Image: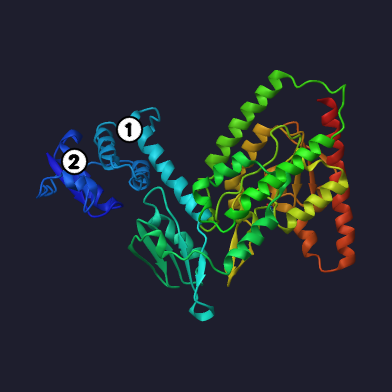
Amino acid sequence: MQYITLDTETDFDGWRKAARTLVLHHMAPADVTWAVQGGEAELFAPPAPSPILEVNEGTFSVSAKFIELAKAAILHRDGERFAILYRLLWRLKDNHDLIEVATDTDVALVTAMARAVHRDEHKMHAFVRFREIGRERAAHYVAWFEPEHHIVELAAPFFARRFADMPWSILTPDLCAHWDGHALSFTPGVSKNEAPSEDRLEETWRRYYASIFNPARLKVKAMQAEMPKKYWRNLPEASIIKPLIEDAERMTGAMIANAPTDPHKPQKRPEASMTRKHAANVLDALREEAAHCRACPLYKDATQTVFGEGPKSATIMLVGEQPGDKEDLAGRPFVGPAGQMLDRALEEAGVDRKKVYVTNAVKHFKFVPRGKIRLHQKPNTSEIRACRQWYEREVSVIQPDLVVAMGATAAQSVFGKITPIGKTRGRLIDLADGRKALVTVHPSYLLRLPDPEAKVQEYQRFVEDLTIAAGVQKKSAHAA
Ligand code: URA
């Protein structure tokens, strides 16, 4: 029996070195026990763990895919992970292609662990809230977070890039990460009562959250899936989530109670609702997959993937450019100033906003930091191309009759090539897949126009373009 003691819970290099040596010594997985220094499993190891074997002559290689999976899976909190990874490595030695067999028990286990780790990393990026301690020059920002897995070292570089100008610490029970404006450092974990709980930033957060909360787009289940309740207690906005939801439900109830009834309205066909249910599942799976997208570098600095939203039965799909600052934080498209302008224009044009699916050509926020502000940057062609798969998959699930491209980036994604807006704007265009497309300007363009008169005129043109979409929506509703 070989007892291997790793230096830390996240000691991938130690595991890799030991695993390689064990394989070269033909040490079967059943004959190896793994522990971490100071960890629980170490208690069961003999007083003097067997010395690690000397590196043998000989060599073997494993695929980059296994290394990538193993680097993530080793951060999982499951105490068996080192042994599971070694068992898979042992089997891969004689069967390289095994890593492609998704149904194999070990491959599935390791893949699921890696996924859970990335999900947790994503949650940490989205739900860490800093609190200010000290004032002005002496200000330091501190956050408390309880990760499910050992992800602090993995997630910390994101915060260093994102909050490069401010000194911060993220305290967790496992490990604490610190940034002094130049370098990251780590210290042992602490208990929650060492983290500050109230400060003057709290109220700002609460007001901000209330301002981006849109009752018309409320989906409690989706919201809880993205922001599980266990994170709520550490979020300043948590105290207003419940009242906001109750308020929204009350308003919806009143709207339904006051809605005119139509005795001739046909009953919903059962097969139609089945199809919708299937579409809902596929869309949820897509959203989950997109949350881990690494197809271009934009995921590195953005808070999260901002996927499209709206009913699966939508006959119109609106496509914007990319999420802005507010969308990046909220995780939902068009909730900031451009979204408010869009909502107003849709209403004036007679488009029923609740029946529209809204998405973006690029699903991560691209920006450059300027002090505390994040300045929007236009996505380039390779980023638009890398993200197009998500747009195409959204179209194939939603099956809209009309796609409205707002701005040049959206048009490039919808038509699959650079498409000048001036030449295509304001008329229905046939797409190769039988759908129609409508090109118009992006609402942010209207917000940026300096001349008030031009602003009014351009806004009117925008509403006129959307009136064409309203016509399609009505026609589709009629045909249904
Ligand atoms: N601009 C966009 O293109 N999309 C958003 O979601 C917000 C602003």
- The quadrant of the image that shows the N terminus is top left
- The quadrant of the image that shows the C terminus is top right
Percent coordinates x, y for residue 29 in the rendering: 20, 35
Query: Eyeballing the image, is 177 above or below 149?
Result: below
Label 2 Cα neighbours within 10 Å, binned few <14 / some 14-19 / many ≥20: some
Q: Quadrant of residue 30?
A: top left
- Closer to the camera, 391 or 329? 329
Q: Amino acid at mark 1?
A: Asp
Q: Is residue 332 left or right of residue 342?
A: left
Residue 358 in view of the camera: no
The residue under label 2 is 33
- Closer to the camera, 28 or 190? 190
Q: Quadrant of residue 317?
A: top right
Percent coordinates x, y for residue 152 in the rendering: 39, 56
Query: Eyeballing the image, is 176 above or below 370?
Result: above
The residue under label 1 is 106
